[in-house]
Amino acid sequence: MNGPSIRMRRLREHPVLAETVREVSLEPRQMMLPLFVIPGTGERRPIHSLYGVDHWSADRLPEIVEPALESGIRSFLLFGLPSRKDPLGTTASDDSEPVQQSLRFLKEKYGRDIHLTTDVCMCEYTDHGHCGFVTKDGTVDNDSSAGELGRIALSHARAGADMVAPSAMMDGQVAAIRRVLDNGGFPTLPVMSYSSKFSSAFYGPFRDAAGSTPSFGDRRTYQMASTNWKEALRESLLDEEEGADILMVKPALLYMDVLARLRDATLLPLACYLVSGEYMMLRHAIAAGALDERRGLMEAHFALRRAGADLIITYAAVEMARLITGR
Ligand code: PBG
């Protein structure tokens, strides 16, 4: 008999066996849905830069949270657009602003049936759009900003957050937040660090949605250069030392090499963020007829699981959950 004696196709022949040997799976529990909350009541406004994503006032959040819960998505990541912005981003830790208000509302309504993580950063709250305090010479001051992130995290914790996720890329921010939470009575509240966060053109649609494009300069003095994977591992491992409970690689699809290497370098759970520009790249390809929606979305999300992600933050969480479970 001619031909190879080892035939890889044997395992692919029967669909049941092919499923049996499938190496990764994706379940709704492994995805987190970002939510954008705005001031006021009765508001639902489509975000034009982000397909299928809306701005919600706190009182209308059940309209998105309930279908998500039905699909199996129970984890949410809250971003807020404040009632006003100033140079110091004072609204970020203000108890009457949308994030804090939404936390109280959702926790009151759903209790421990949902898990709420908050993005801890200043860029949505400062009028200059940077992620920290800007000094006279136009640079972002690290240590005072890290301290402020601690105060913001504490205000989220007090309003009911189940986890905080610092995304400002200030050195020492995880340690600073940990200290404030521990001293403030929240020693068991976990920190998910945006630990390897790159300076990326793929945040474009998000910045439209959050109104957080810097008015001068860019984020390259604090976010990472896209060229540097070793530095990215150092960033994440440092956050582990500072007490982070979950590490994150962001963006996700373009940085899967970093995710896979980080998987080998740490025992902590790993998150990745399929960011707005990556999501819209898929959406535009689908809209143009260049990509099959179901297969394209599945493949992108499965790839992240294969690379080592325990948790995927994705704007397609509900759709993915429905695709997987058939609900
Ligand atoms: C910062 C933050 C950003 C994103 C999440 N948190 C924007 C930035 O760093 O400019 C981007 C998310 C996305 O693009 O989907 N608060």
Image (cartoon, grey):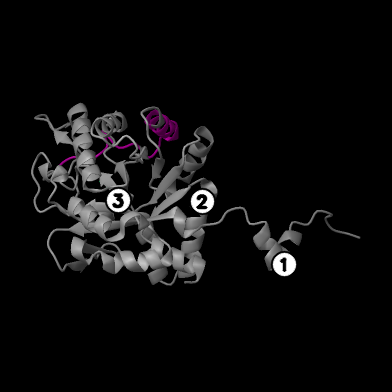
Q: Nearer the viewer, mark 3 or mark 1?
A: 1
Cβ–Cβ under 8 Å for marks 1 and 2: no
Numbered mark located on residue 305 in the image: 2
Residue 171 x %, y % = 29, 29
Between discs 3 and 2, the one toward the N terminus: 3
Q: Residue at x 54, y 50 (%)?
A: 306
**Is ligand 1 within 8 Å of the beta carbon of the residue shown at mark 3?**
yes
Cβ–Cβ under 8 Å for marks 3 and 2: no
Q: Is residue 34 above or below residue 176?
A: below
Q: Which residue is mark 3?
A: 203
The image quadrant that residue 245 belongs to is top left
Looking at the picture, tell me which residue is in the foreground, 114 or 290. 114
Between discs 1 and 2, the one toward the N terminus: 1
**Magenta segment, which residues?**
216-239
Q: Residue at x 29, y 64 (%)?
A: 53
Cβ–Cβ under 8 Å for marks 3 and 1: no
Residue 204 x %, y % = 27, 53
Numbered mark located on residue 14 in the image: 1
